[in-house]
Image (cartoon, grey):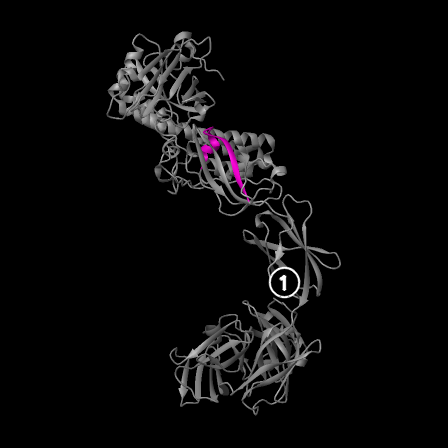
Amino acid sequence: MRYRLTAALAATSLATAVPLAVRAQQASNSFDLAGPPLTMTVTRGEATLPIGQVPGLRAGDKLVLKADLPADQAARYVLILVFLRGATNPPPKNWFFRADTWVPKKGTITATVPEGAEQAIALLAPETGGDYGAVVQAVRGRPGVFVRAAQDLFQASLDRARFDAFVAGIARAEEASTERLEPVSTALAGSLAIRLDAACLSRPRALQAACLTQNREGMVLQTGGGASLAETIGGTTTQFAYSLAATKEAGAGLYSPYISLARDFARLFGVFRSASYQYAPALAVSHGDRMRLQLNNPPSFQNPKSVLVVPLPAIGAGAPPTLRAGTRDPLCLLRPGQVLPLEDAPLVFATDYARDLSLRLTLADGKTMDMPVTADAARGGLVVTIDTARLGQQAIGEAVLTGRWGFDTFTGPRFLLQNGAPTAWAPKPDNAVVVGRDTPLTLQGGAASCVEQVSLRDRAGAVKAVAWKASGADEITATLPLSRTRAGELTLLVAQYGNAAPVALTLKGQSEASRLEGFTLYTGDKDGRLVGARLDQVAKLEVAGLTFVPGALTRDPGGGDRMVLTTDGATETVALGISDAKVTLADGRTTTVRATITPPRPRVELISRNVDPPAPAPGDAALPLTLPDNVLSQDARLTFSARAVNTRLSAADAIEVATADDSASAKLTVAGGGLQLLGGDVAVATLSPRALLGVGAVGAIKMRLVQGDLAGEWQPLARVVRLPRITAVACPAATGACTLTGEQLFLIAGVAAEADPAKAQAVPLGFVGEKLDVPHPANGALFLKLHDAPGDMVRVTVPTKRGK
């Protein structure tokens, strides 16, 4: 859109009686007003580039600068080019160049960057009688202000270019398909270092784009360590530290000076305000030879008139940046949508500084091949135009990005690329394919990044997907689903990007033979332990005239099996030592395994026990419950004594108590106060089940002696139950049914008039009521069968008085 400065605009001028401080507070940070565009070219040696491709100037560069104003431009502008040489060294007068934009033959500035110049700025001043001289005097009077303006405005212009690229990418994505807005916006934010408001993506699709592009002052993130992008493109900063999800409040990422630019420059330029002139900052976003100026406030054409300060690239900067690959993992050239990620290189995507990009491939035969590359922020990296006809199936030794950065050439970064060969994969030597379980298989020789899918085809032609992962640049590890597969020939299919037909590998599925490592039996035990692999094939084991049959099988996470084998014979008199045991497998084959017969394990035998039920709460009117000797409630106090067998006791020993399913266990020790020793062979222990094992400890509990690393056999100790609270038994007649009232009646499995579990009247499972119809008590008692102890009966003493 052409910029027209007319007398009508003067009516909105900020040159009113409003104090400067108030106007500074009102200055906008958004820089959304279009200013008069400038055009510029730079010639270095024999090459001429538009300003949009020039990241920095050098002494000796020839600049051609002019304002691109419409033919009916009403306000006359003087265009001034100034070269600066530091904050404390005013530039000489011959470093100022003037163009009268309304005079065709005087509207263009042609100048050469002088030796010693460090910054350059352009100024657009409304034409008055003393315009040029006033500007020269202001710049030479306080050069540091304009040095600061040149530096910060140039960086802010680069920041604005990143933001504009983000907005343009969002607009294209929304126009193409709103469904792509989320992945495109994420890629754009990563490429351009823009803070992405993830909450916008949860809004209705019609509102997402507008939400993503609002609050622009808070979206552009600053580079790491406070370094300016102007310094970065000059090569003085080699590491970016953008934090895409950070906020200013979190302190993990700071926004660029673009946010506070208007406020800072209102204060900075305030010292120059006179009756005739005030200075206003402008951002310059360059594409091609055109610099599009962005203003944060309308310029004034009545006193004090606005002088626009326009930044130009820094002098002595602009060296090619140090670019780094965004990943060290191999990338497949043939993968659809594959991009080459760059780490923290937003100016590659937001400006035209990087040009003539190509990827130079070094092939296995030593020859090189260049492929064009395009920077695509919406896809999050560099897109390679692949010449598949030339590339074919040649292996790639190395790939490096080359191109130009302004006038200079650069090389780097390097990428690890692959081009999958269709017949390269082969199983790793000694990788057996064992059926009956999920089996890992390692394939070597191909391009791991080019594998698209792995599947398995059995003899019947059924195809199953196979989970796999890259375990190296030329290696993948697949997990074959063979738990329900029989031995025989199998076909593994490896599909690769760019190849129509998958690679077919023929595999031989084998049954894993049992590997027997050893059998151990403690004399006196009924159970022995067999260690090895594929012990599920064991049918029986024979040793010392005893026959053991398979029991529980456990697979160790690190590999191998452990199996319990049980015998009905007497093992107390089996001879100690090592011998061979005969093992019969399920298919009839027999083999031998080393059997070790050891002395009996230390153990304890229960001598006696005593249960102290929990004391009832004061005023509790619940009916008393009498439990069998081997049954106790969770809150009861159990005291038991046990005698050691085949060993002597010491203060370092422990008695371990556990639930039947081993879900809870605890050790009673002398040091812990739960165990006392009487001589060297008797121990007395005291415990409360709920306190020791937790509220989940119900049902049978067991005990064993533990001496160091050696644990004895488990022995039954008692049965722990949860008890209902019975408050009344009402019987309306001398015979017939009665009503039992209480709490937690769901713990009751049945109710009987005598102590016989088989005669108990069943209670519905999950019953949550507070009253039950029960048989008439006999001899003043009812008997409860509990879910926690179905083989025992709990006696309820019923008062002789009948209820109504």
Going 48% across and 73% down the picture, which residue do you hit?
A: 693
On screen, residue 462 versus residue 160, left or right, reads right
Rendered position, 459 above or below 134: below
Position of residue 524 measured from the top left corner of the image (x, y, whole percent) = 55, 88
In the displayed structure image, the side of residue 439 where residue 53 appears, left or right: left
- Residue at the far bottom: name it: 573
Percent x, y for residue 55? Answer: 41, 28
How many numbered discs?
A: 1
The image quadrant that residue 668 belongs to is: bottom left
Give the residue drawn at x 59%, y 39%: 337
Q: Magenta stretch containing residue 533, yes or no?
A: no
Above or below residue 173? Residue 491 is below
Q: Secondary structure at mark 1?
A: loop
Q: Residues in magenta?
A: 345-363
Quarter-wise, where is residue 649 in the image? bottom left
Against 26, residue 793 (above or below) is: below
Judged left or right of residue 81, residue 213 is: right
Q: Nearer the viewer, residue 789 or 273?
A: 273
Which quarter of the rendered picture does the C terminus lie within? bottom right
Give the quarter of the image for residue 627: bottom right
Q: Name the one closer to the observer, 300 or 89.
A: 89
Of 459 and 547, the residue lying toward us:
459
Q: Is residue 349 magenta?
A: yes
Residue 247 percent coordinates (x, y) = 41, 40
Residue 88 in sight in this render: yes
Residue 148: x %, y % from top left: 31, 27
Q: Badge 1: how crowded within 10 Å, few (<14), some, or many (20+)?
A: some
Q: Identify the residue under disc 1.
A: 438
Whether 98 is drawn above or below 515: the answer is above
Instruction: Check disc 1 and give the amino acid type.
Output: Asp
